[in-house]
Image (cartoon, rainbow, N blue to C red):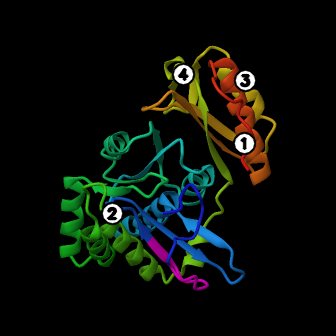
Amino acid sequence: MGKVQQKWPEGVPKTQNVRCVSVDGDADRVMYSFVDGSGQYYMLDGDKIATLVAGYLKELVAGSGLKLNLGLVQTAYANGASTAYITDKLGVPVACVKTGVKHLHHAAQDFDIGVYFEANGHGTVIVSSSARQAIKEAAKAKNAQAEKLAQVLDVINESVGDAISDMFLVETVLHARGWSALDWNAAYTDLPNRQMKVMVADRAVITTTDAERVCVTPAGLQDTINKIVANFPKGRSFVRPSGTEDVVRVYAEASTQENTDSLAVQVACAVYEQAGGVGDRPKPPC
């Protein structure tokens, strides 16, 4: 699908300014992409999908006059630009939880309408039974915005992992707004990001808190990360242990790709030095 590699899908013709939709092998994740007039590749990932859907649903809820609590749930892997956009521009509450669909799904249930998509395109929208009833009654009363809201929600499969229904939801919103892929992408610009892995003797030495955004142990590592991050405009980085192998995963983002790569390597080296790194010392990406 190209999320990590940032590559155009194989076997698909490159037609300028025409959106391409990709799903993974078992069709539980969805991703969009396009190339612009200059041939530049753009990927519209789960963050872009979540902000598109949440923004449109907010408009419909506000227009209907219904007092419904709408929120967006993200993990620490969500791009910082998406969080700023949904919070500052759209005014939609954002909750951050630990990595994993079960955590996202649980937190989304705290809202009348909860939107969540992992950056990899895995997600859905959850609507409480009371919210559905309120929308249904308003629609019956010929509330035009409530009718639209009911129709949009009918497209959604609340069982997470239905890429086809997610695709239909995205297409519904784009059609309703008259947006192209360029319009959608222009809503905000992602910060460059980089992910790395550091081999360690024992991943259990790394523990985290605050939805995995703060490293608790080993003592002093978070202070080191904070000092490194402070050197980079719009810098953000966190580390978390892998759930399956003795590696520590490093995420970094900053104002430019060069700064992002430098930030990621410096944080990875700090992990290597302070958390029992093994094997080769982390190096800049090729």
**Residues at marks 2 and 4, CA–CA distance in whole angstroms:** 33 Å
> For the point 66% across and 21% down, which residue is it?
221
| Secondary structure type for disc 3 | helix
Residue 145: x and y in percent read 33, 75
**In this view, the mark in front (1 or 2):** 2
Looking at the image, tell me whether mark 4 or mark 3 is earlier in sequence order. Answer: 4
- Span colored in magenta: 12-21
Q: Residue at (40%, 77%) from the top-left corner?
A: 171
The image quarter in which residue 189 lies: bottom right
**Viewer-proximal residue among 157 and 32:** 32
x, y percent for residue 53: 43, 65
Whether residue 83 is situated above or below residue 272 in the rendered picture: below
Q: Residues within 10 Å of mark 3 (few under 14, many from 20)?
A: some
> On screen, 284 above or below 57?
above
Identified at 77% across, 42% down, the residue is 262
- Nearest to N terminus: mark 2 or mark 4: 2
Residue that badge 3 annotates = 224
User: Whole-percent x and y of residue 130?
Assistant: 20, 54
**Residue wearing tag 1:** 235
Circle nearer the N terminus (4, 1): 4
In the rendered structure, find residue 27 and report the number of the disc placed on it: 2
Q: Amino acid at mark 1?
A: Gly
Could you tell me how far apart the alpha carbons at marks 4 and 3 are, in whole angstroms?
14 Å
Residue type beneath disc 3? Thr
Q: Which comes sooner in the sequence, label 3 or label 1?
A: 3
The CA span between labels 3 and 2 is 40 Å
